[in-house]
Image (cartoon, rainbow, N blue to C red):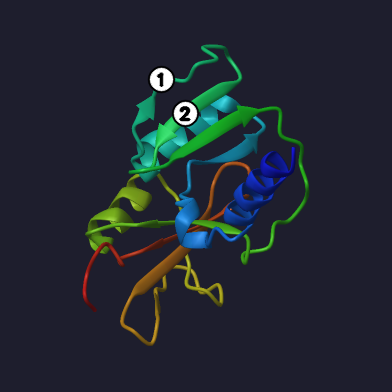
Amino acid sequence: MKKLIFSFCFFTTLIMNATAQDLQVRLNHIALQVKELETSRDFYKNVIGLPQIQDPFNDDIHAWLDMGGSQLHLIEGGIDEGEKDKNNHLCFSVNDMEAFIQQLKKHNVTFSDWPGEEGAITVRPDGIRQIYFKDPDGHWIEVNDDHGSNK
């Protein structure tokens, strides 16, 4: 019996000494509750450019979109929570900021810089450009041009 207890204690010690690097954690998905699924799905597909992927629920309240290694899950049933803080936002990177801005204009989506000047672009100290706008439910979105570049 003593040998079994020692083995269990040794195994527990190994598990408790695992480092964060050993866990291999990665982002799988972000779930976002929305008021009208069709409106939000169209926005994320046609304005942002995320391709829709198959979801296992296959119902009328879920839509899954590919974010290039992770997923965005839209779930109908959101409630109006009032004004949302810009600090809470989704961020996407694009390889061509000018083309993306034209996409926004095509869909009549206004954008601003961080302070809120409409049509302006924030430039970070490292040269990365950022714009901000809201989705149909008022969730803030940042788009930047940090798309694997070495700025």
The front one of 10 and 21 is 10
Q: What residue does disc 1 label?
A: 54
Query: Dot 1 surroundings within 10 Å: few (below 14), some, or many (20 or more)?
Result: few
State the residue at coordinates (61%, 20%): 61
Query: In the image, residue 131 lies at what x, y percent?
Result: 43, 66
Residue at 76% x, 41% y is 80
Quarter the N terminus occupies: top right
Lower position in the chain sequence, tag 2 or tag 1: 1
Name the residue at the front extreme.
2
Residue 110 is at least partly visible in this image: no
Q: Answer with left or right where residue 82 lies relative to residue 65.
A: right
| Three-letter code, disc 1 | Gln
In the structure shown, which secondary structural element does the residue marked by tag 2 occupy?
A: strand
Residue at x-position 59% and y-position 61%: 17
Measured as percent of width and height from the top left, residue 5 is found at 72, 44
Image point 31% across, 67% down: which residue? Answer: 146
Q: Residue furthest bottom?
A: 125
Vertical side of 120 occupied by 19: above or below: above
Which residue type does callout 2 highlight? Answer: Trp
- State the image coordinates of residue 140 (x, y, percent, origin top left): 57, 56
Q: Are marks 2 and 1 in contact (CB under 8 Å)?
A: yes
Residue 122, compared with residue 147, is above or below; it is below
How far, Cα to Cα, is label 2 from label 1? 7 Å
Label 1: which secondary element: loop
- In front of the other: 61 or 47: 61
Q: In this figure, which residue is indicated by the disc labeled 2?
A: 64
